[in-house]
Image (spheres, helix red, strand yellow):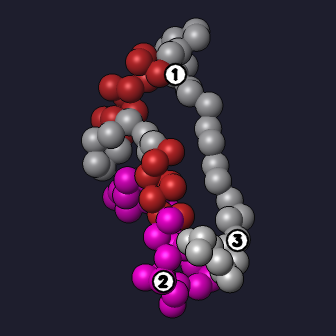
């Protein structure tokens, strides 16, 4: 039996943003890592693909059977910054 047997999941939005460092002409991930980490409440520079897939696996499980019609941000709490 598959994890998704008989279930339907809608993923309507995933956002990806380019690296932006106006002080650098062609920034690399390593160039941006310290600056991005300092802006995030949890201190990590960005969310990894595994962080997103962990939420999707949870939503496809029976443990999430009563979760409907909501947005679950995987953003290290950046929406909660003062």
Along the viewing direction, whichever of 29 and 4 lies nearer the viewer: 4
Distance (Cα) linking label 2 and label 3: 16 Å
Residue at 37% across, 53% down: 76
The residue beneath circle 2 is 62
Residue 9 spot, x, y in % from top left: 67, 73
The residue beneath circle 1 is 21
Distance (Cα) linking label 1 and label 3: 34 Å
Indicate whether residue 18 is drawn in magenta. Answer: no
Mark earlier in primary sequence (1, 3): 3
Q: SS for tag 2?
A: helix
Along the viewing direction, whichever of 63 and 38 lies nearer the viewer: 63
Q: Is 23 left, or right, of 33 in this rendering?
A: right
Along the viewing direction, whichever of 43 and 60 lies nearer the viewer: 60
Distance (Cα) linking label 1 and label 2: 42 Å
Residue 27 spot, x, y in % from top left: 53, 15
Mark earlier in primary sequence (2, 3): 3
The quarter of the displayed image where residue 38 is located: top left
Most distant residue in the front direction:
1
The span shown in magenta is 57-82
The residue beneath circle 3 is 10
Q: Residues within 10 Å of mark 1 (few under 14, many from 20)?
A: some
Indicate whether residue 66 is drawn in magenta. Answer: yes
Q: Residues within 10 Å of mark 3 (few under 14, many from 20)?
A: few
Residue at 46% across, 70% down: 58
Quarter of the image that includes the N terminus:
bottom right
Residue at 45% across, 42% down: 48
Q: Is residue 55 visible?
A: yes
Residue 32 spot, x, y in % from top left: 43, 23
């Amino acid at each position: 039996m598959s994890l998704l047997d008989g279930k339907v999941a809608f993923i309507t939005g995933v956002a990806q943003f380019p690296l932006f460092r106006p002080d650098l002409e062609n920034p690399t991930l390593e160039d941006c890592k310290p600056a991005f980490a300092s802006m995030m409440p949890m201190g990590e520079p960005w969310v990894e693909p595994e962080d997103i897939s962990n939420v999707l696996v949870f939503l496809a499980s029976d443990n999430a059977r009563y979760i409907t019609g909501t947005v679950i941000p995987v953003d290290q709490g950046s929406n909660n910054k003062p």
